[in-house]
């Protein structure tokens, strides 16, 4: 029988660690190799980034929501790009942008609503509730 060496044990441990981390990443668990820390909103970074980079801008996006109000559809597209989803909610067109805030099962959409004059408003109103974020599974 071959003797199991310390190097073999270390290799097996590292291999198992890689498998576990990859599996957790595929299950939607926060990816430990990605940075989820908040960053200020930047249109160029938003347009170039993926849903994780967009999620990092989430806090600034919500606290600075006034800068996203009153824009035309062309203004919103210029600032945020084409939406990932479009829905009509409460007789208003709502555009949704996918984000990943690093919480499995967490909110994953930022809504931008348009009034009857075609002007934008951050968030959406459904019934008597204002929502700054939404969950795609709930739409």
Image: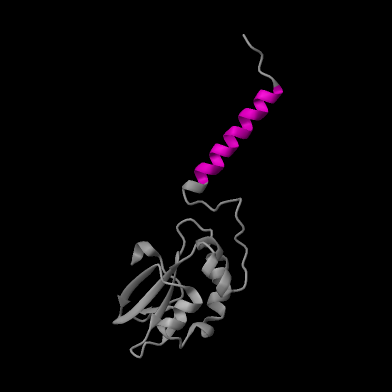
Q: Quadrant of residue 2?
A: top right
Magenta-highlighted residues: 6-24
Q: Characterize the magenta stretch by its predominant secondary structure.
A: helix
- In the rendered view, does 36 fall on the left or right side of 137? right
Q: Which residue in the rendered view is the most extreme toward the right?
A: 6
Residue 126 location (% of width, % of height): 35, 78
Tell me: residue 36, above or below residue 134: above
Residue 102 location (% of width, % of height): 54, 58
Question: Which quarter of the image is occupied by the N terminus?
Answer: top right
Q: Residue at x 47, y 85 (%)?
A: 69
Q: Quadrant of residue 112?
A: bottom left
Q: Residue at x 66, y 13 (%)?
A: 3
Q: Residue at x 52, y 85 (%)?
A: 66
**Front residue of this view, candidates 67 and 139:** 67
- In the rendered view, does 61 fall on the left or right side of 113? right
- In the rendered view, does 74 fall on the left or right side of 37? left
Residue 83 location (% of width, % of height): 41, 71
């Amino acid at each position: 029988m071959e003797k199991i060496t310390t190097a073999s044990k270390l290799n097996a441990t590292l291999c198992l660690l890689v498998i576990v981390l990859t599996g957790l990443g595929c299950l939607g668990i926060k990816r430990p190799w990605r940075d989820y820390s908040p960053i200020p909103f930047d249109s160029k970074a938003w347009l170039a980034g993926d849903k994780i980079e967009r999620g990092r801008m989430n806090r600034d996006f919500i606290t600075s929501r006034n800068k996203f109000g009153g824009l035309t559809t062309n203004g919103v597209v210029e600032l945020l790009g084409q939406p990932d989803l479009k829905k009509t909610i409460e007789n208003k067109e709502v555009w949704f942008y996918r984000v990943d805030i690093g919480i499995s099962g967490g909110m994953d959409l930022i809504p931008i609503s348009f009034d009857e004059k075609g002007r934008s408003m951050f968030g959406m109103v459904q019934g008597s509730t204002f929502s700054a974020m939404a969950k795609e599974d709930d739409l």
